[in-house]
Amino acid sequence: MTQQPASSRHSYDRVEHAAQRVGLIVMGALHPRQVQAKQLDGGTLILLGAGPEFWPQLKAAPEWQGKDPVDRWSLRVVGQLAQDLGAEAHFPFGGPPYAPFIDWALKSGRTFSSPVGALVHDQMGMMISLRGALHFADEFPIPLATAPSPCTSCAAPCTQTCPVGALNDQSFYNVEACHAHLATPEGQVCMTGGCLARLSCPVSARAGRDPDQSAHHMRAFHPS
């Protein structure tokens, strides 16, 4: 673990607690210089995502009324965290160009590529919703991520669960097949409860995702 400079005023615990108070969880942390993260030269990067408390926080927020509530809420909340904690905020939306969140997530050591190509997180499984990142100018200690991918000891139900094989371990994600299925009566199971392949991940089952949240994301992905 990197030793914290004596002059550093930041700490991982402080960031984590601040995120939890607004319904977010830390989904990864990295020192960009040490792992050669894209677009960042140094400091400390903390990735923030939607945890179990995110959904009720969002529905009680003013952004819930209007277009793109998730992104607008993220801009306000993560932006305020950055201001309060002395960091620069980055977001996975608003492009092009887009910030390289996939690269950052993989290099945090807590997110991995699944057999179907989608990302899988050590805590949230395939129910990943990164809402932003905080980049601090200084390097301070972060937990060392050493656990292997959860996929290494998994029977990979995600490769067999999609009703039309849109997510599979051969061609990975067939977006056209997915959209076509979602437009059918049979596809309403996915539309109202979330992607069956992602839900089949054993780690996803422990994520505490509200089905209403999954339905909201599905409507954004496949608007009627």
Image: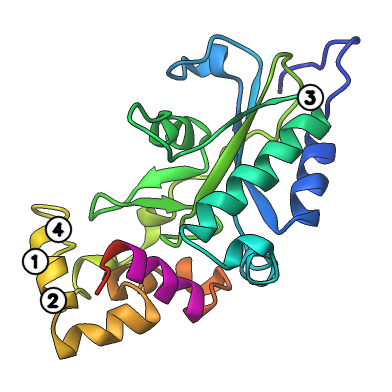
Residue range of the region highlighted in magenta in the rendering: 212-220
Is residue 73 in sight in this rendering? yes
Is residue 165 in sight in this rendering? no
Give percent across and percent down for residue 68: 47, 57
Q: Secondary structure at mark 1?
A: helix
* Residue sitting farthest toward the front: 66
Name the residue: 47% across, 19% down. 37
Q: Which mark is residue 86?
A: 3
Q: Are marks 3 and 1 in contact (CB under 8 Å)?
A: no
C-alpha span from label 3 to label 1: 45 Å
Q: Secondary structure at mark 4?
A: helix
Residue type of the residue flagged with mark 3:
Gly
Callout 2 crowding tier (Cα within 10 Å): few <14, some 14–19, many ≥20: some
Give percent across and percent down for residue 214: 43, 72
Q: Which mark is residue 163?
A: none
Q: Secondary structure at mark 3?
A: loop
Residue type of the residue flagged with mark 1:
Ala
The answer to whether 122 is drawn above or below residue 155 in the figure is above
Q: Which mark is residue 181?
A: 2
Name the residue: 82% across, 40% down. 13
